[in-house]
Amino acid sequence: MQYVDEFRDGELGRRLAQRIAAAAGPRRQYRFMEFCGGHTHAISRYGVADLLPENVRMVHGPGCPVCVLPIGRVDLAMQLALEHGVMLATYGDVMRVPASDRMSLLNAKAQGAAVHMVYSVTDALRLAREHPGREVVFFAIGFETTTPPTALAILHAQQQDMRNFSVLCNHVLTPAAMSKILESPAVPGPGAVELDGFVGPGHVSTVIGSAPYELFAREYRKPVVIAGFEPLDVMQAVLMLIGQVNEGRAEVENEFTRGVTRAGNLIAQAKMAEVFELRESFEWRGLGQLPSSALRIRPAYGRFDAERRFALAHRSIPDNKGCECAAILRGALRPTDCKLFGTVCRPDHPVGSCMVSSEGACAAHYSYGRFKDIDVVRA
Amino acid sequence: MSAKRDYHRPLDMRHGLIDMTHGAGGRASAQLVEELFGPAFDNPWLAEGHDAACFAAERGRMVLATDAHVVSPLFFPGGDIGCLAVHGTINDVAMAGAKPMYLAASFVIEEGFALATLGRIVASMASASRQARVPVIAGDTKVVEKNKGDGVFITTTGVGVVPEGVQVSGRRARVGDHILLSGRIGDHGMAIMSCRQGLELQTPIRSDTAALHELVATMLQVCPRIGVLRDPTRGGLATALNEIARQSGVGMMLQERAIPVGAGVQAACELLGLDPLYVANEGKLIAIVPPTEAQPVLDAMRAHPLGAQAAEIGIVTEDQHHFVQMTTAFGGRRVVDWLSGEQLPRIC
């Protein structure tokens, strides 16, 4: 397939692997966090880690939209679907995220709630047009990638004077999460995250540009290489990161030049700014309350804000006690360090959110990489 | 005075609708059988007019399989629920190594369903059954109230006979055996999915729905020792291989490069965030054969139109954890796991 196969070329991959092996100094360790779940998925699905030398380790980051969604926010969606009787439209991945009381939107649907899986927010608008007598709420989640479409939908609803459409906004911001990880204590032990650099988000950066990461590179002395989501992209980014580490540089470099510019998509940014404003603080699963880390709908568009419309109040619900999602999302623990991993917590019955989406660190490792944890006798 | 001549109003196959009387067992039910099902399937067993069909028993081991079909949309590029219901059950019988002999079909129809649409579906079933030379010899019809069904559900049951000396079972994959696949994967699932999502593709993806029993017969002729046959329907290739690995207590190592996937399926999967390994097929089979037989069986498959793109995709390994693993085209290694729940699209 054109424009895809080129970036999955095994021969080029092998050559890049040789260059990485040659560049990585044998005496040191390289630990790079891929921030995005999209990268986590690509690394696991294509077996990229197998092509990296032993002293280059990828640490999975928190950039999986459903993984960082706290239980309390899913509960709000459940409340809308079950108590307010709205038609709730949301992305497929969200349906299985565990809520309180062993519930999920998938269970709510089985109980008769009108939960609809959509591929984009335009499908939610269509639902609202087709059911003028019903309240339709779009359960909006995601980083800056999915935020501009939500903004456009709200602008469209305003323009068309749609009376039955609103949005439960859970859009979060990448830079806030990266700061949190970098501010984590560097002392060894639980909670310590020692990183030598970041594989920066691809799709997020097409919107916000590469400039916002310059602060991290400067302040925290960590190299950032923004990368596309194909396996060759990730390997090229790793090679560039090793180069920076070896030369003692800490800069923002852009591997994903076919999609990302320094300034990003100015039109998308303007639409986001028009419709959304910063929340003072927002709860992230695993990372806790983070200041200035999420968006809410501006009062001028208040009638499209489901939180106002249905007077919803967020309650913080603690995760399952045994679940290590919090530490895994920060990169402090690996999925296999969690007692629940692969036992009670599996993709078909996830306890923590990292096991839900195939972009989640636990689900990706369980589904694609768990043979590495045990000795497999070969034929 | 002579008796009035009995007036008979035929079924209105153009504008008529199914109503509750068509499933009530009275005149309307009988009329549906006499004017629609009878002529379409046209065979002496149905002509008998009994609820059960009587046929001579064959010598040897017999196979029985049943399969419920609930596909939406009812019509899709490459097929419809009618031919699918015939192919699906024939394939289930054939995957036991058997020669399918007869089918029975039962219809659950929603009140208000257009007779014209039912007519098209029945015609498609009849044509598929004639082509496969497996007659539909018994059937039943029920009608459910409006909004209590999704148009029409069709359950088909098939019986078949296993030829002497053939021993096919999911438990017979042996370490070192070769894994063969009869062609490109994902066509049926993506044909349905692109209809549902309204994907406008340059070349529409067509379902691969087909009856595989003749392909199976030619394969068994070349190698009666074929251990395992399986059609990777729901859950796709990945799920079928995991089932076999668990039943046989073995592992598998696949070569991603060797697994044929059409360009359209690849592109549509990419767009929707799906993996073709988990997408349904309705006209493909997996065969697991001893190493020395792999090439002759593969040649026989390729000589048949339904196996023209057959490929050897991997080998059976010893593995107490029963992992199906794969060397990716990119050069890494991964598990090809069971499907968890439904395949859900990713967000970004």
Image (spheres, helix red, strand yellow):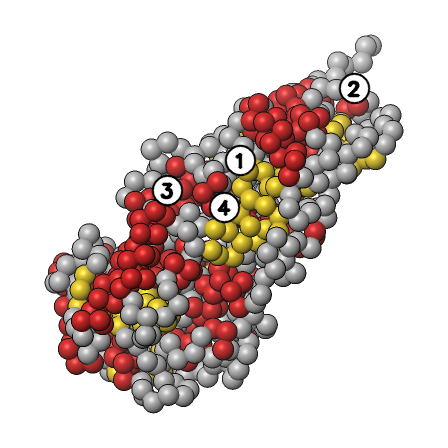
| Quadrant of residue A76 within the rendered picture | bottom left
Q: Which chain carries label 4?
A: B
Q: Measure the alpha-carbon separation of dots 4 and 2.
A: 49 Å
Q: How crowded is mark 2: few (under 14 residues within 10 Å), some or many (20 or more)?
A: few
Q: Does residue B340 appear in this view?
A: yes
> What percent of the width, then of the height, locates residue B190?
46, 41
- B138 lies left or right of A208: right
The amino acid beneath tag 2 is: Pro
Residue B267: image tag: 3
Asked if labels 1 and 2 touch by Cβ distance under 8 angstroms, the answer is: no
Asked if labels 3 and 2 touch by Cβ distance under 8 angstroms, the answer is: no
Q: Do labels 4 and 3 share a chain?
A: yes
Q: Which one is earlier in the sequence, the residue at label 4 or at label 3?
A: 4
Q: Measure the alpha-carbon separation of dots 1 and 3.
A: 21 Å
The residue tagged 2 is: B44
The residue tagged 4 is: B255
